[in-house]
Amino acid sequence: MHRAFIALGANLEDPAAQVRAALADLTGSGDIALVAASSLYRTAPIGADGPDYINAVAAVDTPLPPTGLLSRLFAVEAHFGRTRSYRNAPRTLDLDLLLYDDQVLDGPELTLPHPRLHLRAFVLVPLAEIAPDLALPGRGSVAAWLPAVANQRIEKL
């Protein structure tokens, strides 16, 4: 089994319900087991217009390889009506594979750790809630990066 961390976010069509339902859908498949889920957080869009996002982070265990897990995330997004009309467009669901064990990958399909996870409060704050001692491969601890995102608006629901 492998430990992975997934960011969940939405800002359309009852985003809190979308995030909760997506987490249930994702972990109800039998090959993705929920280990921990953060609280929900409200955040402002970064680099985009639109309504606030509802975000969370989940830790899961899975036998799937990283690309297999990524494919599953894309399938769940599609099931929830995700369209990719333009970069940073409002969305019914956004699922990002943040970390997969301590693997470092830089490929055309997948980069691990997620290249911007250490720059986003909507990832770091919920990640720190469920895994405060987690080390980010090549970047240090989650806790060490929290001051860098302290100016980003985030509200625990």
Image: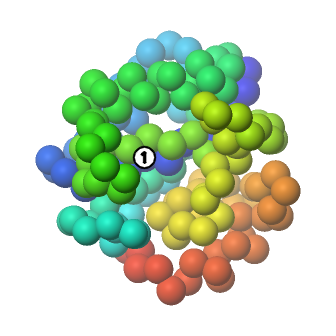
Would residue 51 be found to the left or right of residue 103 on screen?
Answer: left
Q: Position of residue 17 (x, y in %)?
A: 23, 45
Residue 87 drawn above or below residue 148? above
> Is the image coloured rainbow, by chain, by secondary structure, or in one colour?
rainbow
Judge whether 133 appears above or below 111 on screen: below
From the image, which quarter does the N terminus lie in?
A: top right
Whether residue 22 sits left or right of residue 148 in the image: it is: left
Vertical comparison of 65 with 132: above or below:
above
Residue 21, by quadrant, is top left
Q: Residue at x 33, y 72 (%)?
A: 44
Packing grade of label 1 (10 A; few <14, some 14-19, many >=20) is many
Q: Residue at x 37, y 27 (%)?
A: 76
Residue 83 at x, y = what percent?
27, 37
Residue under the point 76% across and 38% down: 105
The residue type indicated by label 1 comes to Leu
Q: Secondary structure at mark 1?
A: strand
- In depth, the one of 61 and 15 nearer the eye is 15
Q: Residue at x 50, y 47 (%)?
A: 7
Residue 93: percent from left, percent from top: 31, 42
User: x and y percent of residue 84 in the render?
Assistant: 31, 40
**Residue 153 visible (yes or no):** yes
Q: Nearer the viewer, residue 92 or 115?
A: 115
> Left of 67 or right of it: where is 100?
right
Q: Which residue is tagged 1?
A: 8
Quarter placement of the C terminus: bottom left
Residue 23 location, quadrant: top left
Q: Is 78 displayed left or right of 55 in the figure?
A: left
